[in-house]
Amino acid sequence: MSESTYAADPFGSPTPVLSVSPVVLSAPGRAVDLEIRVSAPVTGSELPVILLSHGQGYSNHLSSLNGYAPLANYWAAHGFVVIQPTHLSSRTLSLDPDTPGAPLYWRSRAEDMRRILDQLDVIEAAVPQLLGRLDRSKVAVAGHSMGGHTASLLLGARLTDPHDGTEVNLAEPRIKAGVLLAAPGRGGDALSEIAAENYSFLLTTDFSEMTTPTLVVAGDKDASAHLTVRGPDWHADPYVLSPGPKSLLTLFDAEHGLGGVSGYDVAETTDENPERVSAVQRLTWAYLRTELYPGDPAWQAACDALAAGPDPLGRVESK
């Protein structure tokens, strides 16, 4: 292990991971019960928790509890319990397009995460070797793309419900920190015509009340033309338009897949780059580690390692 890698990864060697799925949570009023994957290190106690919300690509199974293995496995191998729901928007469920909330189920997605937190007793009892090992005071949320929108709502972003005009506040006080990966930016005239017409809930996104500490990760080549007329800087809006404390990791030459975070060797990654994925793994883990354990040196070490090389993969700024 190189000196710089070790500096960015104070946990040292990864721990073997136990992954269990599907764990089924009863969900009255939801179209189907909530299925989750739980990944945890086989050793350790008082483990912090990351809720990981999948995106909405065209692959069938990445947008489910079976996606995002590069992130889930890394975080779990370095001391977190990672919980991944299959949201109602997943193609794996093949729900009727007339189901209320279709096609992206923006509200239900956030409610899935609250339901998970409400049923941690059930989850602990259902997963072998997990009982009594969670630290429920240390919970974070992460999400990629549409999952980033879900995470932003839980972190305090607001929107106006396009159906009844009410302001929606889904901020979850049990969540202490977050990571937004290629998440949507502001609405209004920043949206493409297609996005404004088909995803009207994005029109009123407001980050001014998103107060929970958050790391925003954006690729400087992530144009997302189907969603925005602004270009790559749109994905930095959750950092620019929200109050501190926040940090922004801008990845150079990265597109929407951020090198391939949604799965190993997946066809929909347009910018496949294992080194970039490794940087995302280390920096997101280090950020959450330091936010949940104030004084932990992981975040500073990871930032220093990112900047130390002759050809940095990205840059970090904070406010």
Image: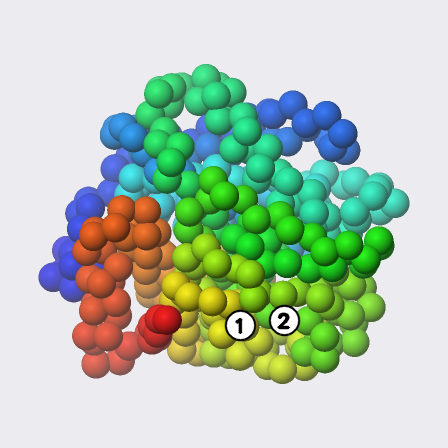
Question: On the image, numbered disc 1 is attached to which residue?
Answer: 241
Dot 2 alpha-carbon crowd within 10 angstroms: few under 14, some 14 to 19, many 20 or more: many
| Placement of 262 over or under 189, stated as above or below | above
Residue that lies at the very extreme toward the right in this rendered image: 98
Dot 1 alpha-carbon crowd within 10 angstroms: few under 14, some 14 to 19, many 20 or more: some
Locate the N terminus by quadrant.
bottom left
Q: Is residue 306 left or right of residue 138?
A: left
Q: Secondary structure at mark 2?
A: loop
Q: At which x and y percent is residue 59?
A: 64, 53
Q: At which x and y percent is residue 73?
A: 38, 43
Query: Which kind of residue does numbered mark 2 sit on?
Result: Arg
Query: Which kind of residue does numbered mark 1 sit on?
Result: Leu
Q: Nearer the viewer, residue 239 or 143?
A: 239
Q: At which x and y percent is residue 121?
A: 48, 21
Question: On the image, numbered disc 2 is attached to which residue?
Answer: 186
Residue at left 62%, top 48%? 170
